[in-house]
Image (cartoon, rainbow, N blue to C red):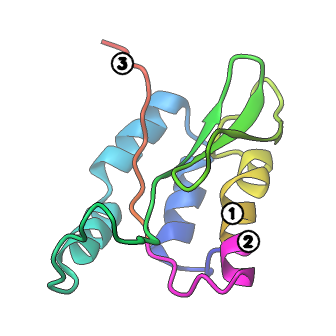
Amino acid sequence: MTEAGSDLSTLIQQALPLAPLARADLLYESQALESAHQAAATTGDTEAPSADDKVELHYVCFVKTEDNRLWELDGRRKGPLERGSLAADDDVLSESALNLGVRAFLKREEEAGGGELRFSLIALSQTWD
């Protein structure tokens, strides 16, 4: 789903072989993510919509639970959606998780005519301090 040679493709390739802490550091220190986030944050000059307006932008999160299931949390839906089972050593950036989660989501959005697919990426993890 990602274009070969793109910042996202490069970031995924760099992250795949890393352990969770190293992945977190990679994401935290990524100049490409910082630049993309800053560009998205400063695009346009639209005022915030009112609470009653229909807004297509929303929060989506993929979470692996302790029982190795991948769940999608989508702000447009009333509850979580189970997307499948993962191997014990898979995390949400594994090929299996990407295929069940992010890639499947992006494909559904594209097929539904969702238009432009811009997003911010945030990783939440436990602290190792």
To which residue does mark 2 refer? Answer: 108
> Of label 3 and label 1, which has the lower sequence position?
1
Q: Nearer the viewer, residue 121 or 89?
A: 121
Q: Nearer the viewer, residue 71 or 32?
A: 71
Q: Are marks 2 and 1 in contact (CB under 8 Å)?
A: yes
Residue type (three-letter) at the residue carrying disc 2: Arg
- Per the image, label 1 sits on a secondary structure element best described as helix
To which residue does mark 3 refer? Answer: 127
| Residue plotted at (80% across, 47% down) | 96
To which residue does mark 1 refer? Answer: 105
Badge 3, how many Cα within 10 Å: few under 14, some, many 20+?
few
| Residue plotted at (61% across, 81% down) | 3
Looking at the image, is 56 positioned above or below residue 62?
Answer: below
Q: Quadrant of residue 50?
A: bottom left
Q: Which residues are magenta?
A: 107-118
| Residue plotted at (62% across, 80% down) | 4
